[in-house]
Image (cartoon, rainbow, N blue to C red):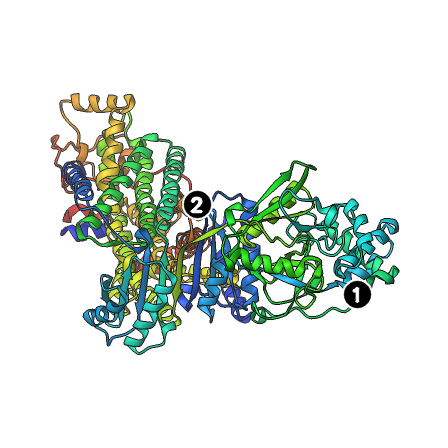
Amino acid sequence: MRRSGLPTLITFVVVVVGLVAAVLAAGWSPLLGLDLQGGVAVVLKPTSVADEEQISQAVAVIRNRVDAIGVAEPDITIQGGNVVVQLPGVKDRERALELVGSTAELRFRPVLQTFPNPELLAPVTSTTVGSVSGNGANVTSTSSVPAVSTTVAATSTSKNEQSLGLPGGAASGEYALGPLPRRQSTPAPSTTSAPTSGDTTTTVGGVTSTTVTASTVPASTTDTIDMSWPPVTPRDEDTNDATVILPEYDRKTRQETFRYALGPTLVTGDALVAEKTQATLDPSNGQWLVEITFKDGDENVGTWRQAAAACYQASNPQVCPTGRLAAVLDGIVISAPSVNSTFSTGNNAVITGSFTQDEAKELAQKLRYGALPVQFERQQTQDVSATIGRDALKAGVAAGLIGLAIVAIYILVYYRILGLVALTSLGLSFGLLWAIIAWLGETRGLALSLSGVVGIIVSIGVSIDSNIVYFEQIKDDMVGGRTMRSSAQRAFHGAMSTIIKADLVSLIGAVLLYWLTVGPVKGFALYLGLSTLLDLVASYFFMRPAVLLLSQSGLAARRPSAFGVRESRGHQGAEATA
Amino acid sequence: MSGLRRLFRGENNYDFVRLWRYGLTASAAMVVLSVGLLLLRGLNLGLDFEGGTAWDVPTSSLSVSETRDVLRPLGEAESKIQTVGTDLVRVQSGTTDPAKIQEVRQALAGAAEIDATQIAVTTVGPSWGNEISNKALRALVLFFIAVSLYITFALRDWRMAVGALVAVVHDIVISIGVYSLLQIEVTPATVIAFLTILGFSLYDTVVVYARIKDNTPMVSVAGRMTYTEMASLSLNQVLMRSINTSLTAVLPVLSILVVGSLIFGATTLQEFGIALLIGLLVGVYSSIFVATPIVAYLNERSPAYRTVRERLASKPTGEPRRAAGRKAAAATVAAAETPAADSGTTSGKKLPAGYSASHPPRPRKNKRR
């Protein structure tokens, strides 16, 4: 039984000081939340019921967008079904908000040229040669405008392509002109695999085969397939009027499969009637297809008809040399079907291409909402200027320091040397807290917000309280006539059990709040919980041994008043004064 | 010796049983008043609960009326305009139209002769407030359940869970009442602060209960105290702690409030500060004057403690009963010998001189390590 807690005490102090020093040495400092350093925050709520997967897909898309505009430490989290996007220190607020909050504009651009990813081509080699060559032919045809009708036939059978047709019209096979590749596990497909659809791996397969084909069957390749790998157009140059190079990804593997040279935007998503974009089953052949409907008017369906006229059989090579029209979202090609009708009447079109049900639904969803799988509405946007943020931080720190100073004076006057113990204990747990906050900021990108600062300030009271509970228990024991020395030993048990019980209540609250709430409440709960936990640690590893040591010192025996306690004069008639 | 000195020395011995009567009456009155206020006046819900947009303009050169003039051409003259501290003007309106928001921002920036990016803008959808409060409410209900279970388990007395919950609800109702009375704006910061208060109030209550539980063995067939008297004694024992703790908690909060509202014009801090201050005070009060009497009341009705009470009541000589001061209490647990009778007075504020001098320090359950 260790009566002197000196080793514990020293170890604890050394550990704390070491940690703080380590954090300092590593140059870490707490990451400030955006209400403290300025920036933009937005809380997005799905407008309809969305499952977790959809939300995390949305988060991925939003993260891509944010990365594209170069925000230093974006914090994008899912909190209670909402997506919370925090962009501290962001410069172009309007643009950032627009990018994050809105579903991106859908653009239809004519495909000028197709570039398969050379990295995917290289390792491909041995893929099922038979089908490959066949597909290769397809591919070629796809990319090179109207040329290969024969290939087409093959293609249609291999059910890999997409095409844009009239509703109820021919299945993809018929208009094989530039069918978009839609590969299921079939390695076949021609050019593109919509990244959207679940076909991922297949795409790769398709791509691969394409490659192979390209190399093995030079004849067909000739026209448009280019083995070069042009750079993707940067986002800010991706305007409607520009000719751009944009990538297509395989959604599952996230590998880039193709890049396309695309002409100026011919039709925008505004022309679509979102609610009428849907996946349906074609009753005539049991195939899934995506129906799209355009709004009336020259600026809507009119643009569509012009585009279709230009692309149909590449009738206007100036505008649409490949006969394919790519749907582009967020600078990414989601589908590049060939056009198999002029759409001179009616407002409807269908995209066919041997989709599975999931693929069709996903494509429809993308066309409907943009790249986000669910539609969001902005619940709250906060745009904090750097000045106001800094002021809030200053105010918070000042309030904390002033509060601490007053508490320190009070506690020192009241408990004297024991007060010093309480303050040292507080200082140590604050040091630990600071190290943890810095660590969280550095490794988890977890920022300290104003509500967190308030949580910490409030926890000053709770931390000091642990000491007070102990000290009062000691005093209480001493009233019973004990010496400080023996009181300090005995009182700790009762005190610690009280401290643990009470702190656990705080912890339960903090955990539940953290778990169940959104935004600022969460930050607050985190820091309140952390400091409560540290309070327990400091009580056990510092307060107890420190007080025990002090109580055994000669000073405690000679001048208990230095500890704010009074040795009971019970035996000499303490109550005489009562 | 003055009350303060007695407190400091841990020799206070207030008759809480008597005080409880006043306390409970006052609490009931305040709760009724609060509910009435809430029904009649309602709450001043902030932007986050109503939906709309707030612009914070860091300027000292614009007055409220000048700001209104700036907004008039934009059709936003009905906006709520306040100056916060000396160098911040806050404009709030119900609009959430992004274009309008930018217009107002530009106009305000022009009038204040600052860059538009220096103006902080917060836009809130109309359902956000509900979202926050619903989530907070759900968290709250779960929190109550968890804490009840915890208290029942840790203190082995479900009555304490009841007492703690009643006290907490009491705190919330009264805090809301104060918000309604003063028409202070309710913001998310307020919600957070209230949640904190709950935690604090419960924390405080648990500290009191822990002591009551430690003292419970005093109320036994051989003992000289009813449960109620023991509870009162326990309160006396933890009173100094409660006062000190409350002070050390209130001082930083006061600092938040003062610094936040007067010195830097940091409105969020101010919002936190007000709610925390109100809640802390009510919370400390309720653990003494609401939570404890409820537990005492409930326990007096449990068979074991009722027996003790009846036996004590029937004793003709009477015992020093409530007069059992802290020293006496210590002795009670330890020694069974009868202390000097105190003529059965129930007020017993003081002990006879030399009363406990005859007792050696109590040997207690040794848990020394």
Q: Is A290 displayed left or right of B122 in the figure? A: right
Callout 1: 10 Å neighbours few (<14), some, many (20+)? some
| SS state under label 1 | loop
Q: Is B178 displayed left or right of A535 in the figure? A: left
Label 1, on which residue? A223
Answer whether residue A57 is visible to the viewer in this image. Answer: no
> What's the mark number on residue A295?
none
Q: Position of residue A470 (x, y in %)?
A: 35, 50
Q: In the rendered structure, are the residues bearing label 2 and label 1 in contact, judged by CB atoms less than 8 Å apart?
A: no
Mark 2–mark 1 distance (CA, rounded to whole Å): 58 Å
Task: Out of A422 and A22, give the one closest to the viewer.
Answer: A22
Task: Out of B191 and B322, give the one closest to the viewer.
Answer: B191
Compared to A206, does A89 lie above or below?
Answer: below
Disc 2 marks a residue whose amino acid type is Leu
Q: Position of residue B317 (x, y in %)?
A: 14, 25
Q: Position of residue A548 (x, y in %)?
A: 41, 54
Which picture quadrant has residue A407? bottom left
Residue located at (28% from left, 76% from top): B112
Label 2, on which residue? A516
Q: Position of residue A57 (x, y in %)?
A: 57, 51
Callout 2: 10 Å neighbours few (<14), some, many (20+)? some
Could you tell which of marks 2 and 1 lies nearer the N-terminus?
1
- Observer-side mark, 2 or 1, equals 1
| SS state under label 2 | helix
Disc 1 marks a residue whose amino acid type is Asp
Residue located at (35% from left, 31% from top): B157
